[in-house]
Amino acid sequence: MECITIPRIEYRNFCERIIDRTKAKNIPLEGQMEVTFRCNLKCVHCYVAEDSTKKELTFPQITDIIDQIHQEGCLWLCLTGGEPLMRSDFLEIYSYAKRKGFLVTLFTNGTLITSKIADYLREYPPFMIDITLNGITAETYEGITRVPGSFQKCLEGIDLILERNLPLTLKSNGMILNRDEILKIKEHVKRLGKAKYRFDSLLIPKLNGSREPCRLRLSPEEIIDIEYADDTMREQWRGYFQDEYEIPDPENLYRCGAGVDSFCINPYGELQLCPELREPSFDLHHGSFREGFHRFFPKIRSAKYKTESKCKDCEVRHLCPQCPARAILENGEQEAPVEYFCALARKRQEMKYKVLKDILA
Amino acid sequence: MDFLEKCYQKDPDTPSRKIADEIILVPIRRKLADVDSIYLLRENVTLRIWELIDGLRSVREIIEIIQKEFDVSAEQAQMDIVEFFKQLEKIGGIIREVSKGEKPEK
């Protein structure tokens, strides 16, 4: 008889194992549910745009969708927004997902976390809580959120989570308004001791077409300077630079995992490849998740380049954040190169040579 | 009560997920110390035992079924399966089903 044991394996190894085992099986392992687009903050850089012509999913509709994605094999579920805690039934949604056996991550701005919510999360711990911290001073933070008092609320939320030893990642969106505080935020997170940190350098246009957030972008030089100056970020990039990457078919427009093993559902019940690709979407009011994921998505993903876009076989493509979703938001056309991304990819290529040269030295 | 006569059910606080032919146990009240690790059931025999745990079958009945379905001696099956149930109970995967007239264990 085979060995009867219950292996307890480290999470990192488990991830590699499950991704390997499900490869090519088209299982929607990772999902993101935007449970609301409402938010108590008014962040200048935020890409989310509420659509007042559409109705948010109700609790029964959300649980029905959770049942469906559970059935299809989704394991990692991220509950996000807007600000998910704006929903009065958020903890019910969260508990429902937990009871179904999802590994639930919560994306929040942290300002609405109360002792009661934190106690509940301690009782039923999430897989991870991600809190956005875009400044280390009230002036910078609130210059971004445009809500007086929100900095203190965010710090209190972070404390409530840390006091309960819950898994926490703090993240920052780099922009001209907090350029000089990014590394200070990271140092602050290090001093907190128990939290992880992530820097996100990319701002994208709003979903309603406004390019306002793009005006706040850091230059490619500034991004690289921040990432190169920090030991951890430099190490992460070094790992990425040294990894072998698969050269995709140059004709394929879609090259990421969106819609292959991941998906996003917006607050109005529309299934999308990812949060940034709003259209085309599949309306879950009129069809099942299964139908959307296994029939609708492959049609989108099978798209080939129709133009002679320079992105097709660009040599720094693997260092570039360009994708059809971002090209649509930026240029209104999915094949059109985003010049800002081109400049960033070229800078990153320079960083790659520098980092690899450092290793040799 | 003889351990073999006990009946177990899956702990509703530990939902299981079958993904890519393996069962993952996801305790919803998991201890925070456990966050960095995952429990897996991945051998055919453990997957079958998990399927058989329904709150109605006793440990003895499950051993008998496994013994018939897998090529194994009675002695070996009993030893391994009893150990497996103890492990499952320890990690919170199963709980004892309380029989009629029996006082719950404290």
Image (tube, helix red, strand yellow):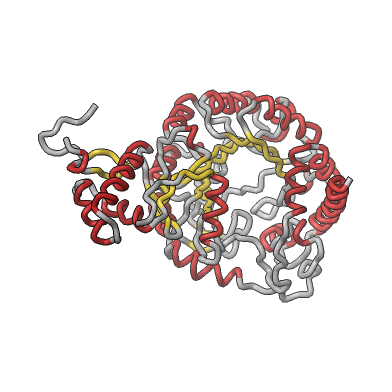
Specify whether residue B20 is in view.
yes
Q: Is residue A87 above or below residue B41?
A: above
The number of numbered badges drawn on the structure is 0
Identify which residue, A208 or A174, lies in the foreground: A174
Residue farthest to the left? B101
Q: Position of residue A120 (x, y in %)?
A: 43, 30
Q: Is residue B96 left or right of residue B15?
A: left
Res A236 quadrant in image: top right
Q: Position of residue B43 (x, y in %)?
A: 40, 56
Identify which residue, A117 or A247, lies in the foreground: A247
Quarter of the picture holding the N terminus of chain A: bottom left
Q: Position of residue A137 (x, y in %)?
A: 73, 25
Q: Which residue is located at x 80 percent, y 61 percent?
A: A316
Specify whether residue A212 is in view.
no
Identify which residue, A57 or A295, lies in the foreground: A295
Q: Is residue A326 above or below residue B75?
A: below
Res A153 quadrant in image: top right
Q: Which residue is located at x 28 percent, y 43 percent?
A: B82
